[in-house]
Image: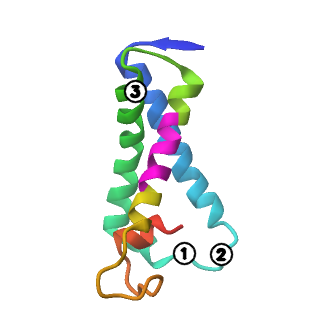
């Protein structure tokens, strides 16, 4: 199905970004308690921002006209690509994987 209009393309991409966040929480369903970062305002701000980032990337790719599944895929993959980029950056002065406080990096390590 092909959608026309910048807003429609953007919203479908946002749907992909939302699916990414939904998958994140689905992966946490079996944990006995929520991660520390889930109580952080910074986490929720990043979460809310990642959804429209997916929408914006779909719009950047396709502009005014896009196949719905491709726009959804771009919106879904954008936060995942950003996650991999951020996690792969070495931590300055710290041992990798030993972060004991909620951080942007710990948000992306799910």
The image's mark for residue 61 is 3
Q: In the figure, 49 relative to 30: above or below?
A: above
Specify whether residue 81 is painted magenta.
yes
Residue at mark 2: 31
Residue at the (58%, 60%) spot, across then down: 25
Q: Nearer the viewer, residue 44 or 74?
A: 74
- The alpha-carbon separation of the residues under discs 2 and 1 comes to 7 Å
For the magenta stretch, what is the residue range?
74-82
- Say if mark 2 contacts mark 1, CB within 8 Å: yes
Measuring from the top left, give residue 11's x and y in whole percent: 43, 28
Q: Nearer the viewer, residue 15 or 70?
A: 70
Q: Residues within 10 Å of mark 3 (few under 14, many from 20)?
A: some
- Sequence-first disc among 3 and 2: 2
User: Quick one: SS at disc 1?
Assistant: loop
- The alpha-carbon separation of the residues under discs 3 and 1 comes to 35 Å
Q: In the figure, 14 relative to 21: above or below?
A: above
User: Quick one: SS at disc 2?
Assistant: loop
Q: How many marks?
A: 3
Assign the C terminus to one quadrant of the image: bottom right
Residue at the (43%, 23%) spot, across then down: 9
Measuring from the top left, give residue 101's x and y in whole percent: 37, 84
Overall secondary structure of the magenta section: helix
- Say if mark 3 contacts mark 2, CB within 8 Å: no
Image quadrant of residue 30?
Answer: bottom right
Residue 85 left/right relative to 24 = left
- Sequence-first disc among 3 and 1: 1
Specify whether residue 63 is painted magenta.
no
Residue 92 left/right relative to 3 = left
Residue at the (45%, 44%) spot, across then down: 78
Residue at mark 1: 34
Assign the N terminus to one quadrant of the image: top right
């Amino acid at each position: 199905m092909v959608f026309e209009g910048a807003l429609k393309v953007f919203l479908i991409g946002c749907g992909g970004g939302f699916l990414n966040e939904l998958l994140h929480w689905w992966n946490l369903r079996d944990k006995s308690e929520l991660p520390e970062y889930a109580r952080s305002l910074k986490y929720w701000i990043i979460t809310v921002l990642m959804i429209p980032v997916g929408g914006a990337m779909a719009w950047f790719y396709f502009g005014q006209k896009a196949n719905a599944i491709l726009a959804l895929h771009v919106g879904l993959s954008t936060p995942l690509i950003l996650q991999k980029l951020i996690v792969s950056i070495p931590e300055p002065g710290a041992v990798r994987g030993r972060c004991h406080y909620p951080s942007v990096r710990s948000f992306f390590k799910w």
